[in-house]
Amino acid sequence: MQRNWKIFLLPYEQAVAELKIKLRTLRTEFIEQGTHSPIEYVTGRVKSVDSIKEKMHRRYIADELLEQDMQDIAGLRIQCQFVEDIYQVVDLLHDRTDLAVVEERDYISNSKKSGYRSYHMVIKYPIQLTSGVKEILAEIQIRTLAMNFWATVEHSLNYKYQGDFPQDINSRLKRAAEASFMLDEEMSKIREEIQDAQKYFTDQKFPSLQANKEESDASLDSK
């Protein structure tokens, strides 16, 4: 039976859209409270049909098992400033009642052989459809800005070399991964100073924003 891909992917598109809004709102909540947000950027995507078919072929995934065996049809990426932020985001996701964490892979404490680092979480997320509630799987990748830069470069090179990197490039990528992680470690050591400086900069650069917000809130209260 031929699959209707447009209908099949609709719940995944809805999940990505909803989760992006919820996670970005979480970031806004931290900022409005005047505290450091562990979330810097949130992006998301739904795999293309060609990408799904290619992965099904490569991983020998049967059509009838697609929804349970392919966990990243819906994918979200959270970028953080510091390694510590990653684990705070992990805790935040565990505490949510609108999703369930079903699998975790910590590639930060246990990096891949290539040097890849990131924290992966597979979640089960309910979507409201006309036919009722449908629970789908989605993958959330959580990484620092430095980790994301390295992973983006490595992913681009993968398209060119199909994972079979020349030895020279492979060695340089591994060294770059270690340098990237050393940067994250150094930034963690002065994390409090950086956060204080960022707050000071925001307060000095945009002092009128909070005043305007308070004035607007007061205006609404008087109506």
Image (tube, rainbow, N blue to C red):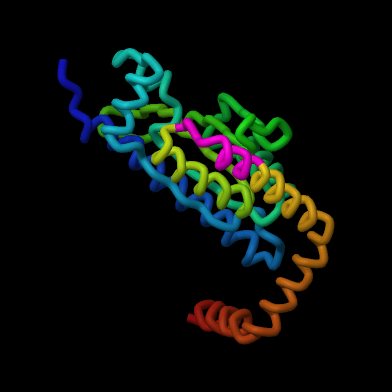
* Quadrant position of residue 101: top right
Image x and y of residue 192, in percent: 81, 62
Q: Is residue 165 magenta?
A: yes
Residue 147 appears left or right of 160: right
- Residue visible at 41% across and 28% down in the picture: 136
Image x and y of residue 170, in percent: 58, 38
- Residue visible at 43% across and 46% down in the picture: 44
- Furthest toward the left, the residue is 2
* Quadrant position of residue 95: top right
Give the magenta part as a residue range: 163-174
Q: Nearer the viewer, residue 142 or 58?
A: 58
Residue 171 appears left or right of 129: right
- Residue visible at 60% across and 43% down in the picture: 173
- The quadrant of the image that shows the N terminus is top left
Residue 136 appears left or right of 222: left
* Quadrant position of residue 38: bottom right
Image x and y of residue 88, in percent: 70, 45
